[in-house]
Image: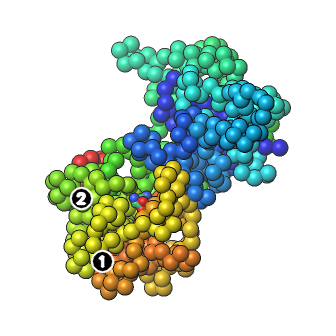
Amino acid sequence: MTKHIFVTGGVVSSLGKGLTSAALGLILERRGLKVSVQKLDPYINVDPGTMSPFQHGEVYVTDDGAETDLDLGHYERFTNAKLTKESNYTTGKIYQSVIRKERRGDYLGRTVQVIPHITDAIKEAIHAGVSDEDVDVAITEIGGTVGDIESLPFLEAIRQFALELPAEDVLFVHITLLPFLRASGEMKTKPTQQSVGKLREIGIQPDILICRTEQPMTEDMARKISLFCNVRRKAVIEERDVENTIYEVPVELVRKNLDRIVAAHLHLPSDEPTDLSDWEAMIQRFMAADKECEIAVVGKYIELHDAYKSIYESLDHAGIANGAKVKLRKVGAESLCDQGTQLLEGIDGLLVPGGFGERGLEGKINAIQWARENGIPFFGICLGMQCAVIEVARNLMGLEEAHTLEHTPHTPDPVIHLMESQEEVSDKGGTMRLGAYACRLAEGSRARELYGRAEISERHRHRFEVNNDYRERLTRAGLTLSGTNPELDLVEIVELRDHPFFIGVQFHPEFKSSPLHPHPIFRGFVAAAVAHSASRGAASRPREESRV
Ligand code: GLN
């Protein structure tokens, strides 16, 4: 029988519920259990695929091609949970399924209502989120904040869900904030009390309270919270902001006994200790890193860290693998159009991530030309790879007007064009080339050397691709087409040989990197950037992140 943990949040959003859920998953795995992790999002979009990154942050893609919330990235980086289309449901997706049934006549004769029809569909979604029969613990995070109107059906559904299971098979974890009032020098428990009050009104009594705080929670406060919120003292847990890396969160939670409290409540085997030794060793390596490099990420959404979350995480993982601190220089693609490549002076590597639309495109192409001509390590992802192909076509093949059809539908040289399967597509949601596809790597290529394998699988999210009509000419111009899709014969990886590091990939490697298993291309890219930094004797440069 699978046991269930529900994670809710109160007081404010952005408390790190996703991170805490992921950390909890890791902790349980390190006690020898099999977990699945799922997110329920109360907004009405069917999935976040059609939302601007400014609204929602990055769209995370699973192997089976679901466009999902970025918290699923945390789940995959921390745990081995198998994530699929069933791992992320929104209000829109739930209503879509209920309305489809209504139209089909499945409810013939009945009035379709939030209770029981929507709540039943949510309960089915929770069951569907349990990836395999032998999952010991399924963690379900409820997005949003308790008290939001749109969260109500989800909270009602988990209340009902709990009723249908033995008490020791369900655990409610509520994450709240203990704000610190500078003026009075005090931390306040009232918002936590009110948030738990809201939950109890709905009929949910949290079993564990995780209190996010900047300052230490005193024993007095913990007792007060326990008393007012009806939660045992030992289950009121402090989760203080970590100092160095988010990967410290699970270690801190174990230090606060979260593992034992969960195990006791769910009647899980309790004699096994939580073995986080490899995780702690990874944190040690992160702390001990004594090399450094500075990498410019040139994108449209650099103001919002979450817009490129998995990319930044993957760079950190690669830093750990190389014993280096990776300093980020976040450069707006549009400022590159206005101010030119001087914004890139002094960097050790250029990363151009994925994106959509035309804004800032020329800035990205100029940046890539600059990196190519100056021997600066370059890594292009999806749109970044497409820009690299345009750059090579324009400047090495002499096709001055080469472009992508996404941007210039009438270019004489559409080196990037629409995939055939996309030509008739009119809906925007869920219709791109999505999810995992195989890719064959060319013998003797850098990609093959980095992966150490001849065939790989990587995740995709795009409509456009390299135009095969230009393959021969691109190759003659010096571009190695080092990765191709064996079934569809699409170009997946391009690289330049006579360059310290110049690789573009049509897929999204950032979705498959984790701190214990850094992605091979990120690892190679950061290694090249570290070598570049060392060759310039860069040890004395400052370390903070900068934004241009
Ligand atoms: N806009 C490009 C396409 O659809 C690239 C997509 C991406 O970078 N994810 O092909």
Secondary structure beneath label 2:
helix
Q: Note whether residue 366 is visible.
A: yes
Q: How many labels sit on residues?
A: 2
Q: Nearer the viewer, residue 97 or 518?
A: 97
Cβ–Cβ under 8 Å for marks 2 and 1: no
Q: Position of residue 474 (x, y in %)?
A: 33, 81
Badge 1: few (under 14), some or many (20 or more) residues near its Cα, within 10 Å?
A: some
Q: Position of residue 62 (x, y in %)?
A: 57, 55
Mark 1 residue type? His
Quarter-of-image position of residue 516: bottom right
> Which quadrant: the N terminus?
top right
Residue for badge 2: 363
Q: Residue at x 49, y 30 (%)?
A: 13
Name the N-terminal-most of marks 2 and 1: 2
Q: Position of residue 378 (x, y in %)?
A: 32, 67
Residue for badge 1: 499
Of the four image quadrants, the one with ligand 1 is: bottom left
Q: Note whether residue 377 is visible.
A: no
